Image (cartoon, helix red, strand yellow):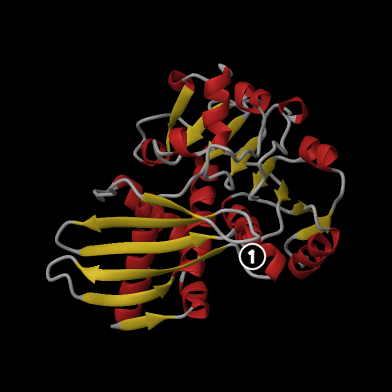
């Protein structure tokens, strides 16, 4: 069985290529059973989550990701998301590969947001706001810049030191990256707003949004988590990665409960966008919103792409 380290995963899963692999996967035939969620009590820390995410392509590959989310890791200077991925033969069930699940998750999550942005963000989008300074933030910044002509990036986070460090590390010839402490002003000035936090209170306010923006919400994976308020959802044309987002993310669960959003107002899923079954951005002044909760389809597509590159 082949083992892939985090550095091997990061090096092999080039952004542009992985975006296209995900596009093909959403157009193809992948079985993705409902994932398992298990809450775990952690002494003197916030509650953690264990997720089991299986998927398979009949006769080819079977894969399962075991991933944990420990919000308290931030205080330990560790990433909140940890995990491993196991790829199996779809004909014999034999283990083929063990893959670093943390890096696989970072790469596929960022590229899924980029895939959505390829349909939903304006083609001339140049200014990106990144809300959040965790492990996913640099991957999201580079992924959005791979599908849109992003030139200027602002980074906002609760920890000023981490925010400044992330901006300094990413600032370069292609991207001008700066830290900001003015969240409202940064939202108002951005073409694309990407948010990847563990927040339980809305950070993106609908009153701040301007015509033509695209909002990418990644962090809320539970009903009590929230990154955008009711007004943001009400003003936007909303898309989801999968139906699970309607039950798992507070960014949709809470406005549906309050009446700010109805199920029939969901414009479509990432699969429907990739298959051409629903339209993406319809006009320049439209506000679009993509809610990502992640799907095992993305993990399997990335794992198969990685494994087959290594075989070749």
* 154 versus 191 height, above or below: below
Q: Could you say which is closer to the camera, residue 35 or residue 103?
A: 35
* 90 versus 207 height, above or below: below
| Residue occupying the point 57% across, 44% down | 220
Residue 86 visible somewhere in the drawing = yes
Question: Label 1 belongs to which residue?
Answer: 73
Question: Which part of the image, by quadrant, shows the C terminus?
Answer: bottom left
Q: Residues within 10 Å of mark 1 (few under 14, many from 20)?
A: some
Residue 281 visible somewhere in the drawing = no
Label 1 element class: helix
- Would residue 256 be found to the left or right of residue 65 on screen? right
Q: Position of residue 230 (x, y in %)?
A: 64, 25
Q: Quadrant of residue 71?
A: bottom right
| Residue occupying the point 52% across, 23% down | 256
Q: Could you say which is closer to the camera, residue 143 or residue 299?
A: 299
- Would residue 96 be found to the left or right of residue 44 on screen? left
Q: Could you say which is closer to the camera, residue 250 or residue 206?
A: 250
Q: Position of residue 28 (x, y in %)?
A: 27, 48
- Would residue 312 be found to the left or right of residue 285 on screen? left
Residue positioned most to the top: 259
Q: Position of residue 211 (x, y in %)?
A: 70, 26
Question: Which part of the image, by quadrant, shows the N terminus?
Answer: bottom left
């Amino acid at each position: 069985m082949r083992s892939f380290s985090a550095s091997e995963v990061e090096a092999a899963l080039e952004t542009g290529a992985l975006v296209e692999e995900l596009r093909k996967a959403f157009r193809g035939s992948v079985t993705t059973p409902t994932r398992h969620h298990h809450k775990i009590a952690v002494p003197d820390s916030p509650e953690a989550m264990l997720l089991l995410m299986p998927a398979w392509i009949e006769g080819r590959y079977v894969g399962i990701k075991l991933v944990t989310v420990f919000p308290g890791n931030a205080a330990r200077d560790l990433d909140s998301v940890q995990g491993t991925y196991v790829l199996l033969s779809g004909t014999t069930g034999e283990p083929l590969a063990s893959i670093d699940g943390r890096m696989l998750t970072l790469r596929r999550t960022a590229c899924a947001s980029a895939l959505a942005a390829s349909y939903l963000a304006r083609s001339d989008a140049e200014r990106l706001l990144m809300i959040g300074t965790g492990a996913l933030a640099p991957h999201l910044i580079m992924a959005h810049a791979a599908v849109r002509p992003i030139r200027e990036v602002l980074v906002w986070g609760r920890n000023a030191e981490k925010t400044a460090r992330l901006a300094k590390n990413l600032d370069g010839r292609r991207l001008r990256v700066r830290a900001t402490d003015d969240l409202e002003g940064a939202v108002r000035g951005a073409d694309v707003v990407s948010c990847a936090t563990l927040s339980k209170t809305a950070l993106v306010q609908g009153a701040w949004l301007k015509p033509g923006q695209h909002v990418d919400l990644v962090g809320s994976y539970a009903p009590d988590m929230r990154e955008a308020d009711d007004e943001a959802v009400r003003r936007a044309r909303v898309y989801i990665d999968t139906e699970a987002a309607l039950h798992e993310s507070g960014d949709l669960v809470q406005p549906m409960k309050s009446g700010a959003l109805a199920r029939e107002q969901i414009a479509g899923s990432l699969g429907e966008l990739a298959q051409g079954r629903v339209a993406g951005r319809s006009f320049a002044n439209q506000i679009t919103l993509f809610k990502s909760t992640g799907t095992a389809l993305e993990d399997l597509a990335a794992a198969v792409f990685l494994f087959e590159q290594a075989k070749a």
